[in-house]
Amino acid sequence: MGEDSRPSMVDVSGKEATLRVATARTTMFVPDAVMALFSEGEIQSAKGPVFQTAVVAGTMAVKRTSDLIPMCHPLPIEGCEISIDVDDSRDIIIDCTVRVHHKTGVEMEALVGASIAALTVYDMCKSVSHDIRIGETRLLRKSGGKRDFDVSSL
């Protein structure tokens, strides 16, 4: 917080711009009724291709993170990749990796991208079942700032 105890954006003017990369993951559970729509690597709902739409929504969210989270710096995003897979437990795994050369990191952008992609899957499948659960959203790794962070191998 600022000197007067009010929220304020962190001053990064004295920091060096470096390559910043962050990856976040959201895990979802969908019931059998939704999985029955799964074919050839994609869930097709009445609203269209679910995973493809979720990737677009997540990417849009990454670019709008500073509009959604008050103290986030607006960043010129240089790369955003979102992958959506179904694991052996039939959970949907959404990974979002964001890259930028800047003075501040992209952890929030990666977390927002993975979260909004999951919410989009929910929205597109809720007409089939409301027994969809969005589970944990967490940072897997980040690099390029004061310290690196990596729990992806745990």
Image (tube, rainbow, N blue to C red):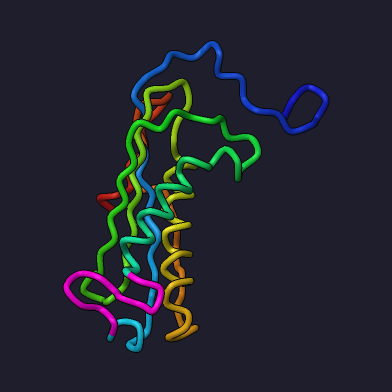
Left or right side of 104 for 4: right
**Residue range (magenta):** 37-48
Q: Is residue 5 above or below residue 49?
A: above
- Relative to 84, residue 46 above or below: below
**2 drawn magenta:** no
Q: Is residue 27 above or below residue 57?
A: below
Q: Residue furthest top?
A: 14
Viewer-proximal residue among 132 and 57: 57
Residue occupying image coordinates x 37% and y 23%: 101
Q: State the residue lying farthest toward the bottom.
A: 33
Place residue 95 in its image quadrant: bottom left
Relative to 139, is 45 above or below?
below
Please state if 149 lies on the left or on the right of 39 as rendered. right
Report x, y in % for residue 13: 55, 13
Q: How many marks?
A: 0
Q: Residue at x 41, y 68 (%)?
A: 121
Residue 65 % position (x, y): 53, 42
Q: Residue at 38%, 75% (x, y): give it.
A: 29
| Residue 128 placement (x, y as % from top left) | 42, 86
- Residue reaching furthest to the right: 4
Tell me residue 143's x, y (percent): 34, 32
**Can you tell which quarter of the image residue 46 is in?**
bottom left
Residue at x 38%, y 60% (from the top left corner) = 54
